Image (cartoon, helix red, strand yellow):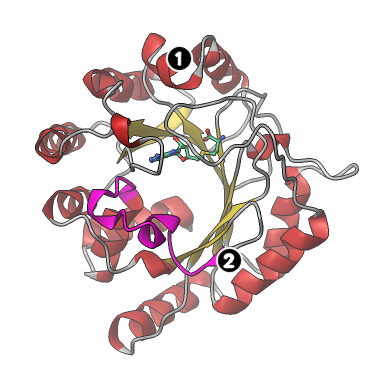
Amino acid sequence: MKPFIYLPLWFFKTRFLGQNKPLQTVLFITNECNLECRHCCVYSKDHIITKPYVQIKEELEYSYNLGSRFVDFEGGEPFLWKYNDLTINDLTFLAKKIGFFSTTITTNAQLPIIDSKADSIWISLDGIGKFHDMIRGEGAFDKLEKNILESNHPNLHANMVINNLNHSNFEDTIQWVKNNPKLKSIALNFHTPFPGTESLSIPLDQRNEIIDQIIKMKRSGYPIMNSISGLKYMKKDISNKYCHLSNFIHPDGTKRGECEGKTLNLCASCGFCMSGEMRAVMNLKPDTLFAGLKLRV
Ligand SMILES: C[S@@+](CC[C@H](N)C(=O)[O-])C[C@H]1O[C@@H](n2cnc3c(N)ncnc32)[C@H](O)[C@@H]1O
């Protein structure tokens, strides 16, 4: 079924008939990473898992059969994934063949982004220069900048996670994205305190002030992916009742119908911008619906 038929039908059944089907899949294909970010607890150095192609195929088909039509390949570092002579482009082809409408990759941009077949690529950018390196390691920003400039991908976006190490740099980071001819937009998130990373959180009142400033910048034309409605929902009540709109399949193969943060009881301090965006979508906020369709379809 084409997106313009599937999506309104999915929305109607979910919003008004109580349907409980995901629309998006976050699929972790490896936990191997070439960075050791201070805010992250997904990567592993001692117990590396690289999922075999057949397992990923089964997980894509499982998610598609649940109802999902968008897939984000995650890690670890997804561009490290290789299986025999297959690369992540083969996973992108596979997802499209199964019927997914679009594929995205979230990457740290430490490897070249050349000839990727994903529909869009999200580059994790946690500040400019020393701010990014403080979280992601010495030299990571320079590599990221070079790989962005040399990329031939037409649909690159940045993804920032604001925490207590980089909060003073978020405006400069938004400005940097605006000035970068290769980047189309930036999504702004806040740190979610997964176990062991609690000390990076920022207090809610400070976070709300930052959101107000992001809204101002968005209104004055900065290329911010978050919708104003989504940002407002992030301020109001950040625990979310729509997180089941994404399903997650973890590096060890665990399948979850919603974010791990819910299992860990972290919803009240969730920083993922998708929580606000999903809420705005389900409340039919036109700015969010328009931005979501533009980005995904
Ligand atoms: C786990 S990383 C994996 C993909 C890739 N290696 C990268 O760095 O983008 C995916 C995204 O999750 C974000 N992330 C990691 N830990 C987080 C946390 N505690 N709270 C919010 N976002 C987090 C990262 O900044 C990144 O944008």
Q: Amino acid at mark 1?
A: Asp
Where 181 sits versus 10, above or below?
above
Q: Residue 273 shows which numbered tag?
A: none
Query: Earlier along the polypeptide chain: callout 1 or callout 2?
Result: 1
Residue 41 in percent (x, y) is at 50, 39
Question: Which residue occupies the foreground of this view, 193 or 152?
Answer: 193
Q: How many marks?
A: 2
Name the residue: 42% across, 79% down: 10
Amino acid on which the number 2 mark rests in the picture: Lys
Residue 125 figure quarter: top left
Quadrant into which the N terminus falls: bottom right
Residue 272 on the magenta span: yes
Residue in view at x 38 percent, y 35 percent: 197
Q: Is residue 282 left or right of residue 235?
A: right
Q: Which residues are magenta?
A: 255-273
Label 1: element kind:
helix
According to the image, label 2 marks what residue? 255
Along the line of sight, the residue nearer the viewer: 151 or 63:
63
> Is disc 2 surrounded by few (<14), some (14 to 19) or many (20+) residues within 10 Å?
some
Residue 44 is left or right of residue 84, and the answer is left
Q: Where in the figure is residue 265, as x and y percent of width and height?
A: 32, 58
| Cα–Cα span, label 1 and label 2 | 33 Å
Q: Position of residue 215 (x, y in %)?
A: 16, 39
Q: Nearer the viewer, residue 230 or 81?
A: 81
- Report the residue marked by disc 1: 133
Q: Is residue 62 above or below residue 157?
A: below
Label 1 environment density (alpha carbons within 10 Å; few <14, some 14–19, many ≥20): some
Residue 223 visible: no
Q: What residue is at 66 percent from the left and 55 percent from the top?
A: 252
Give the camera-side residue of 157 and 265.
Answer: 265
Secondary element at tag 2 = strand
152 displayed left or right of 40: right
